[in-house]
């Protein structure tokens, strides 16, 4: 397996996205981009060290549209990161820790933003304006989002998992065992429409899986038990996920697991699948590209 590594000044990297041939990294020191697959990096939305530079905690992209979650709002670009605009969400400002695009984003321009303490916000005009959509969401500490169909979305929270059947306008709790919460990552099966499989990464109880859209749950046997499942990504070879110090690849729907990489004393915080490559962001600031 070929490995290339670039260090981002030893600053924690929280999120990854790709757009217009560029790789974007959301990190503690702001939003960075790489035009060469991670070999070199530059500050994406201003100049390093400028006043107002704030942590970027989540990223999503579709085509040349890029969205970055920050404290108080969402940065958006519609030209592959050439220019950026800030959309404020509310006052007091929420910390946006999760973003999800509608599966029909190119047609409906819809996306959701999950915040650390203020619930979920929604935009239906490609991130220009936002409003709170928290009806039925009794836990406003949202850690992860997953959007299955234009109408069906999931939210992982400190107390469990909620789902919406009307595109995020109203939420209802799923019967996820509360003693396994918090849920810090979510990943849909590539064939969710037919197999109804949803993976939930927990903070202390490993990986949980549902094969009926979240109605029933069971534990997935991983090579390393009892660790946080911080991030997941679907690859052509199977489901990739990061534990506290290990990157795993699950084949056959998670029936068998392979250790792709160990990173002692660090935590894998974000994953991005790109064709036959997997990009991994580590807590120490490194962005590692692995050929699968």
Image (tube, rainbow, N blue to C red):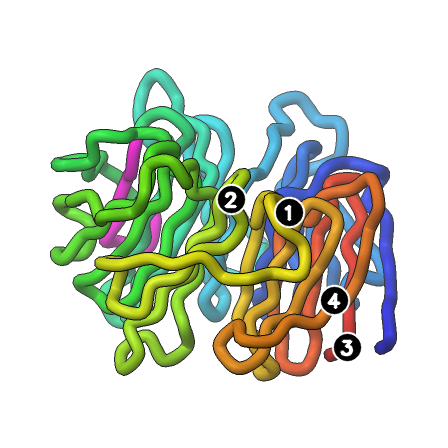
Tell me the residue that label 2 is attached to: 205
**Residue at point 32% right, 53% down?**
111
Q: Quadrant of the N terminus?
A: bottom right
Tell me the residue that label 3 is attached to: 291
Question: Who is closer to the viewer here, 11 or 22?
Answer: 11
Tell me the residue that label 1 is attached to: 269
Question: Dot 1, how many residues are within 10 Å of its Cα: few (below 14), some (14-19), or many (20+)?
Answer: many
Q: What secondary structure characterizes most of the magenta part?
A: loop
Spatial CA distance of label 2 from label 4 is 19 Å
Asked if labels 4 and 2 touch by Cβ distance under 8 angstroms, the answer is no
Residue 51 lies in quadrant: top right
Query: Which of the marked residues, 1 or 2, is nearer the chain's N terminus?
Result: 2
Up the image or down, 51 lies above or below 208; here it is: above
Tell me residue 115's x, y (percent).
39, 33
Up the image or down, 250 lies above or below 194; here it is: above
Nearest to viewer (mark 1 / mark 4): 4
Query: Which of the marked residues, 2 or 4, is nearer the chain's N terminus?
Result: 2
Q: For numbered disc 2, what is the local secondary structure? A: loop
Q: Can the viewer see residue 73?
A: yes
Tell me the residue that label 4 is attached to: 259
Asked if labels 2 and 3 touch by Cβ distance under 8 angstroms, the answer is no
**What is the magenta range?**
119-128
Asked if labels 2 and 1 touch by Cβ distance under 8 angstroms, the answer is no
Question: Dot 2, how many residues are within 10 Å of its Cα: few (below 14), some (14-19), or many (20+)?
Answer: some
**Residue at point 28% right, 72% down?**
196
Spatial CA distance of label 1 from label 3 is 19 Å
């Amino acid at each position: 397996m070929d490995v290339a590594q670039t260090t981002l000044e030893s600053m924690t990297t929280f999120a990854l996205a790709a757009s217009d041939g560029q790789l974007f990294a959301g990190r503690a020191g702001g939003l960075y981009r790489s035009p060469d697959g991670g070999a070199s990096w530059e500050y994406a939305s201003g100049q390093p060290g400028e006043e107002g530079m704030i942590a970027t905690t989540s990223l999503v992209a579709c085509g040349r549209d890029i969205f970055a979650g920050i404290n108080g709002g969402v940065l958006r670009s519609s030209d592959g990161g050439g220019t950026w605009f800030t959309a404020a969400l509310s006052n007091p400002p929420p910390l946006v820790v999760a973003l999800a695009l509608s599966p029909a984003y190119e047609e409906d321009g819809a996306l959701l933003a999950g915040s650390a303490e203020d619930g979920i916000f929604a935009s239906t005009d490609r991130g220009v304006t936002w409003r709170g959509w928290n009806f039925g969401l009794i836990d406003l500490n949202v850690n992860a989002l997953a959007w299955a169909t234009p109408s069906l979305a999931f939210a992982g929270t400190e107390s469990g998992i909620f789902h919406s059947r009307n595109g995020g306008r109203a939420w209802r709790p799923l019967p996820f065992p509360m003693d396994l919460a918090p849920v810090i990552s979510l990943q849909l099966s590539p064939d969710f429409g037919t197999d109804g499989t949803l993976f939930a990464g927990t903070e202390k109880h490993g990986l949980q899986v549902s094969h009926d859209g979240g109605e029933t749950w069971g534990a997935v046997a991983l090579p390393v038990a009892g660790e946080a499942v911080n991030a997941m990504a679907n690859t052509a070879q199977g489901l990739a996920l990061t534990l506290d110090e290990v990157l795993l690849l699950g084949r056959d729907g998670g029936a068998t697991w392979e250790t792709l990489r160990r990173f002692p004393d660090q935590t894998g915080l974000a994953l991005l699948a790109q064709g036959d490559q997997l990009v991994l962001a580590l807590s120490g600031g490194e962005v590692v590209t692995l050929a699968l």
